[in-house]
Amino acid sequence: MRHTNWKVVTLACLFAAATMPAQIASQQVPSQPEASGQIWWKHAVVYEIYPRSFQDSNGDGTGDLNGIAQRLGYLESLGIDAIWIAPMYPSPQVDFGYDISDYENVDPQYGTLADFDRLMAEAKAHRIRVVLDMVLNHTSDKHKWFIESASSRTNPKHDWYVWRDPKGFTPEGKPIPPNNWISGFGGSAWEYNPKRKQFYYHNFYKQQPDLNWRNPEVERAMFDTMRFWLDKGVAGFRLDAIPTLFEDERLRDEPVLGGTNAQGDPILSDIYTNNLPEVHDTIRRMRATADKYPGNRVLIGETYLPNTAELDKWYGGEKHDEVQLPMDMLLGFANHLDANSFRQRLTEVETQVHGSQPLLVFDNHDNIRSWDRYGDGAHNQQIAKIVAALLLTPKATALLYQGQELGQPTTIPTRVEDVKDPIGRTGWPKEKGRDGERTPMQWDASNDQAGFSSKSKTWLPVPPNYQRINVKSEVADPDSMLNWYKQLIALRRDNPAVHDGGMVMLDRENASVLSYARIDPDRKAVVVSLNMTAQPQTVSLDLKAAGVNGGTVRTLMASDGSLVSATSAEGLTLPPFSSWIASVQ
Ligand code: GLC
């Protein structure tokens, strides 16, 4: 099983003015009551929906927009603030929607624009905002822009993609790619086009040609598509693969680091294809575009970065004028349950981003689920409760991925012929692809498709564990993962210290237990202690030194019954892998 994060391993190596009339905008923006001075995304829980796998409403075995609409009641009861919908635009589906052929429509598989408008209205009625996925690095090779660009060297869009002459020709007359760059999905990042007699660059599949962001027409066209959705009232965008917009103009070869990756390609340093400084000017203009709209529209970045200093640049540093919420991938994808390392990463992201808001994330549609990445095989449920607490109790915005709240495990295909994700076919058996984390949402045990679909053959199979792990049965079980998530989300909404309080690390030398306090302006606090080991651990938390008023504690949430009656944070024994959250009186 893949226990590493494909992005951190693969991508870190490889790439590792609104024209809308104001009254229309305000009509369409969700009008959730917001206490004055509060910005919705600062306290939000954003829930990622992978539309193929959330809910199928028309019995074709694939999820769709009307399916999402049917499940809004569930999402509201979970307490989330916004949904991020992975790409639902027209697409040949080579990369399951991340290869877009029309940015201003809905793929017929998922519904229609009218369905989208209805979903927006219904989401608003459930007090849920809608964030869309915006794929700016590349389009599909079936997008009309690329078709035109590929048609000649002189057409009006000839420079919309990254075209280059061959470096030369082999003795057999085969064109040689311009440099050594490798695609994140395997093989050379250059594809030859016999018509233009040139190569085009693709950071991902060859069906995903990279746009040329050095051409201002590209920026204009893409910002227009963003306005199209902002005009419809979307709350913002998750910016796909955003650090890879620019490539080195001189096309210098990337340094070879040695060894080969799962796809059999040499491992390169990605200094000329990832996180180039030029990107920040573009992002500042993008932010200014979004800021012209009312309602605090948000930009969320898919930002796999090497360290917190780089992450800070994506916020715009002290100017705060770029992405409001670049994802911190360093904490959630550390992939090692370790109190010291989490303490350090949490401290960094809370204190080294010029007061910007951290965005924590442990799961998405690209990585083995945290259930398996952090689980030890024996205490997965307890460990997943620690992960949930770590996601939802710090001073941070939280991103969760469908099924995470159920403790849905990863179900990796066992036969290459069953694999749907192309990188799993080309990389088999070293890289089995991302199907495992994309299996359908498990709603109930009413049929073999876990209530996801009425069709017996769903696009990816529903694993047999749906009988036990599903929304319906977990709603009924007070100790379930789902109820743990619900309580945590309610706590961060209702408890002023957890909602908006400051954050102080406690017991900083403890290598086994991570403890911190959230403190509100009246110095009232909530204490969180997470035992990250398989042994019981006794902690003594010095609350006074942390500036907390009071000393008597009252357990608010505990993953182990023995902690429910705790009255003091001194000499408290935490059972193996237990989580304890208490208010201080
Ligand atoms: C992002 C998406 C991933 C996709 C890739 C190319 O990383 O999360 O699913 O394959 O971009 O668009």
Image (cartoon, helix red, strand yellow):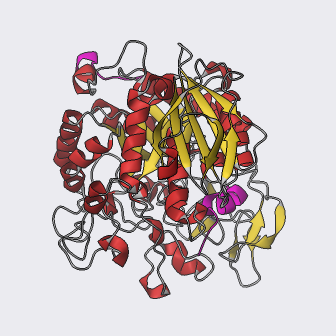
Q: How many marks?
A: 0
Where on the picture, by quarter, is residue 292? Answer: top left
Q: Position of residue 222 (x, y in %)?
A: 44, 40
Q: Nearer the viewer, residue 529 or 327?
A: 529
Where on the picture, by quarter, is residue 519? Answer: top right
Q: Position of residue 488 (x, y in %)?
A: 43, 41
61 displayed left or right of 422:
left
293 displayed left or right of 532:
left
Q: Nearer the viewer, residue 447 or 227?
A: 447
Q: Position of residue 44 (x, y in %)?
A: 42, 33
- Residues rendered magenta in the picture: 1-23
* Residue 216 visible somewhere in the drawing: no
The residue depicted at 62 percent of the width and 54 percent of the height is 333
The residue depicted at 59 percent of the width and 83 percent of the height is 429
Q: Nearer the viewer, residue 60 or 506?
A: 506
In the rendered image of this protein, does residue 383 appear above or below residue 358?
A: below
In the rendered image of this protein, does residue 483 appear above or below residue 227?
A: below
The residue depicted at 41 percent of the width and 47 percent of the height is 485
Residue 371 magenta-drawn?
no
Residue 11 magenta-drawn?
yes
The residue depicted at 58 percent of the width and 20 percent of the height is 550
Q: Quadrant of the N terminus?
A: bottom right
277 displayed left or right of 521:
right
Q: Position of residue 401 (x, y in %)?
A: 43, 53
* Residue 233 visible somewhere in the drawing: yes
Q: Nearer the viewer, residue 578 or 115?
A: 578
